[in-house]
Image (tube, rainbow, N blue to C red):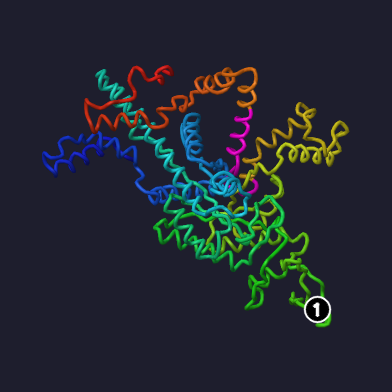
Amino acid sequence: MHHYKSETGNTADTLARYGDTWNAINPENVARMRLQNRFKTGLDIAKYTAGVMRADMAAYDKNPEAYTRSLGCWHGFIGQQKMISIKKHFGTTKGSYLYLSGWMIAALRSEFGPLPDQSIHEKTTVPELIAELYTYLKQADARELRHLYTELDNARADGNQVMEQAAMEKIDNFQTHVVPIIADIDAGFGNEEATYLLAKKMIEAGACCLQIENQVSDVKQCGHQDGKVTVPHVDFLAKINALRYAFLEMGVDDGVIVARTDSLGAGLTQKIPVSTEPGDLAEQYNAFIDGQPISSLDDLGPGDMALRQGDQVIKPERLPNGLVRFREGSGEDRVILDCVTALRNGADLLWIETERPHVGQIAAMVDRVRAIVPDAKLVYNNSPSFNWTLNFRQQVFDEWTDAGRDVSAYQRDDLMQAQYDDSELSAEADQLIQEFQREAALKAGVFHHLITLPTYHTAALSTDTLSKNYFGFEGMLAYVRDVQRREIREGLACVKHQDMAGSNIGDDHKEYFSGNQALKASGKDNTMNQFG
């Protein structure tokens, strides 16, 4: 906790050591500026937020009702407004994080323009966005504290000691907007040294939590697309080690590593690892490779290879590009091996990329992992790549069918149609969607729920609505009714956009620096005064 009076006193002591030459500096103003900028570096942020996240993980272990959530952000302003909104509506940021999505960086932040999620964007954009998000969150702190300072000044001017004390308590108990960011480092953007170097930059920018996936870096695909290729465990563990070394080197001793497995939807490998002793990870990985049994070297053609699997020798099935197939249906078993191996070798949390949102499916895999590692916990992607409406309506349809209920009024493959929106089946499906995160936390070990790309879609939807009406017959009414009036009615801070951009903070600083001669922007002719 930062105390206003003690911070002012400490500053006064510092100024006194320099005699009369620093008399122009007001210690209370310095204290205010310090409290508005309590995190001086990204490493300060990483250390603080790592502690927050570790405490939340411990709380979840005691009570899975205490799961956490986040939304993906592709710009600092988006992340800032999210945290301001959460504090406004719920009074606390506890349990609320930000997610930094590699997909959204590729699609929205690359100098090449929109790119697919294949790690072909500039990797420097990743730490740059982390730094940007925290810059905006720190500015949200400065803005809210500035308002509290105004309360304090007004109370003093009125001689109201009760209100003065209340304002002081608000300042001393201020809760920062700075929260953990789960940051996507994709498949590491190269070899383990490249992963380490990028991880350091991300940590320096403020990241306390890095999420890395077990795909091959140079052919990485979006988790919900085809053509995914995984790496052997020894290669993935080298990158987990690289992340841990980066955290420890930078002094973030309790940094969090999320190990993501794409094995459920990945049917290919680029590399057959070398086994050095019976039953090691390489042998377990190779046991899933598909191929034709052979009994003689004559069964091999030019360029073919042979692989011993237990008591038999197979000719692995390879694609024309040299990639090797895994056995059909082996995905879940590979996921379990990935998860257990990662947790036993330095990872803190798991991410299992699935093809649909289904609590039963997730729980079945987590139960197998927890039989070996009892405190295994997941970060789960509540992805917009899923058609949530269709998936859950089909889940209800199947449950009703199994229970012998009459489903003749519904066509399973057509349940997305608007004609079903007001039906009993759809109401039950919506209830399941509403309960999904809590159910997955309680039954499937999900510590953290995130939506990777929400603000990509909300920006598109709100822009479409405004464009349709503004450029249509409604004109300015479309903006006033659907944007500004709603901002005012719902108390959005950004309706006073000059204040949000820091104009009033700048006025304070001008007054600190120049005294009565300061030329301030917040006078009677500022049109922001129209908003009260």
Where is 282 relative to 77, above or below?
Answer: below
Q: Quadrant of residue 455?
A: top right
Which one is in front, 96 or 15?
15
Q: Nearer the viewer, residue 191 or 382?
A: 191
Position of 110 with respect to 6 (left or right) is: right
User: What's drawn in magenta, residue-wise?
Assistant: 443-464
- Can you give x and y, in whole percent of width and height, for residue 283 in the image? 67, 73
Mark 1: give few (<14), some (14-19) or many (20+) Cα within 10 Å.
some
In magenta segment, residue 444: yes
Quadrant (top left/top right/bottom left/bottom right) for the N terminus:
top left
Q: Position of residue 523 (x, y in %)?
A: 32, 20
Q: Position of residue 18 (x, y in %)?
A: 13, 44
Res. 66 visible in picture: no
Q: Residue at x 52, y 56 (%)?
A: 257
Q: Is 302 or 312 nearer to us in this picture?
A: 302
- Residue at the spot 34% in from the left edge and 40% down from the top edge: 37
Q: Quadrant of residue 4?
A: top left
Name the image quarter holding residue 153. top left
The amino acid pointed to by label 1 is Leu
Q: Name the residue at the right extreme.
A: 408
Q: Is residue 378 left or right of residue 296?
A: left
The one nearer the camera, 180 or 119, is 119
- Residue at left 50%, top 63%? 242
- For mark 1, what is the residue? 300
- Residue extending farthest to the left is 20
Which element is circle 1 on? loop
- Residue 499: % across, % down: 40, 28
Work out whether 130 lies above or below 471. below
Q: Residue furthest bottom?
A: 297
> Is residue 30 at all visible to an observer of this figure?
yes
